[in-house]
Amino acid sequence: MASPENEGKHELHSPRAHNPATPLDESFDLPSTVDPSYLISLIRRLLPSDVKASECATDSGSATDKLKSECGIKDVTRLVESDVVKEMEYSDRHDDTKHIVDNDADQDSSRHGNGNGSQGGSAVEEIWEECGCILWDLSASEEHAQFMVENLILEVLLANLMVSQSSRVTEICLGILGNVACHESLQDKIPYTNGLVQVIVEQLLLDDVPILCETCRVLTSCLRGNEGVTWAKTLQAEPLISRILWIAENTLNLLLLSKIVDLLLAILESPTGVSSLLLPPLIKLDFSSLLVKLLEFEIGKLREKSFGRHDVLDLILRAIEALSTIDTHSREVCLDRRLWALVKEMVELPDKLEVSSSCLTAAVIIANILTESDDFALLLSEDVVFLQGLFDVLPFASGDNEAKNAIWSIIARLLALFQEKEISPPTLHSLVTVLSSKTELIEDELLDSPLQATSMTKIDPRTAAVKRIPDILLQWRSMVAKEEAKLTFTPFNINNEDVDKLLQICQNL
């Protein structure tokens, strides 16, 4: 992660105003079924200018033939010669259509310094952008996206990506592709468009934030799909892997950071075929250390009370959690002592409400670390503040049994360590203070989900934890009695009624 003093050194180009993928509930006020001929007319207007010129071409070497051969479009005439759309004018028939036009975008921007985009003059570019933005939003609907795919939208987008010099055109093309990729029934159509996967992946090499955001969105969806291995084979080249990690470490744009970490998370959570192809080159380039650096940066921002970064923090923790569960690669990240301190800090946060999901993930990571490292367990063995933090996280796991079991397993491990060691009186008082203050929480946990009978070989972590509590409470009472007899007892803020109630609850199980 670039440090504040180096902000100008590595920052990618700032994003222009652009149209994000529109959620269905915020989409245009259009009927559920749009006139098919209107959609075809919009797709037709996205054809690169040399293909449009081919309508009038008579020679066999026309641009249409070139598009057929290079992009795999087998029936361009469906778009450029159709009687249905030939005389249709978007501006005449659909003036009342609501759509978003990016008035702030630089229409003449070019990745190669050429002010003239591939679509011709500025007026044509404006029409192209308006039509592209409408298709971008309409493609959020699976029904509309299906019709677009059937009418060669993928081939048309590929043609534009291959010839366009306009960053805005590229962004819109990738935005439409991102929406198509979000539809499970359609995402597998993309790899079957000859050359499209390679062209999309190559967009990672550009220094343009909106393009990179949309590229990551396409890749994230497709890596999780049935054809994820096809994408992984294209991505596994070391320069591309290195580029992904470089963006993650150096971008100062929060949206791009979120997208790139989500892409890395998709690699970790994808089927085995994808992770087996992409994880080795990632690990070779110190992937686990990068994740810890990113986490360190975000927790630093959390200390500074920076708002709006909680989603990124959660994604990074989820990526670390996913990596910590992969047998062949978990040990390296689990033995990173920087990570120990960071996830422990998350659990001990006094105010967890706004980052509850992140605290819960941090607790699960700690459970995974404890399976790899006894040293970490010893480090926590007398940390009563950490134990209280675990109990504070527990209510956030109400709907997640896996996370709840992970937290109880840590509590059971810590209580066992407390019993095995000779605890000093102040530590024992602090421990009982925490346990007695959580009496109602423990009771509610047991009422919501009573303890189940367990076999001799497998003990439920909550059962193991709860059954250790009476011994600790009785040990504390014995110590108090001895101190009172010696007139050395120092009163602590412990409610004896809570101790009695907790003891009764645990002994009656």
Image (cartoon, rainbow, N blue to C red):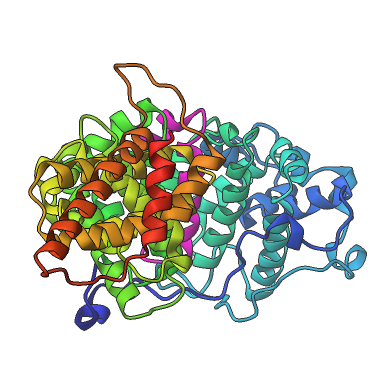
Q: Which residues are magenta?
A: 206-234
Q: Quadrant of the C terminus?
A: top left
The reply, left or right, for residue 211 in relation to residue 90 is left
Q: Give coordinates of residue 235: x percent, y percent.
A: 34, 40
**Viewer-proximal residue among 46 and 10:** 10
Would you place residue 507 above or below residue 288 in this image? above
- Residue at 40%, 73% in the rendered image: 113
All told, the count of numbered labels is 0
Please tell me whether residue 216 belongs to the stretch shown in magenta. Answer: yes
Would you place residue 375 above or below residue 42 in this image? above
Q: Quadrant of residue 108?
A: bottom right
**Viewer-proximal residue among 346 and 260:** 346
> Is residue 216 in view?
no
Please tell me whether residue 118 belongs to the stretch shown in magenta. Answer: no
Q: Quadrant of residue 434?
A: bottom left
The reply, left or right, for residue 122 in relation to residue 330 is right
Q: Quadrant of the N terminus?
A: bottom left
Extreme residue toward the right, this view? 93
Q: Give coordinates of residue 253: x percent, y percent.
A: 39, 71
Q: Give coordinates of residue 280: x percent, y percent.
A: 21, 35
Q: Main secondary structure of the magenta part?
A: helix
Q: Quadrant of residue 291?
A: bottom left
**Viewer-proximal residue among 208 and 345:** 345
> Is residue 440 in view?
yes
Q: Give coordinates of residue 199: x percent, y percent.
A: 44, 45
The reply, left or right, for residue 165 in relation to residue 286 is right
- Residue at 53%, 37% in the rendered image: 449
Extreme residue toward the front, this view? 485
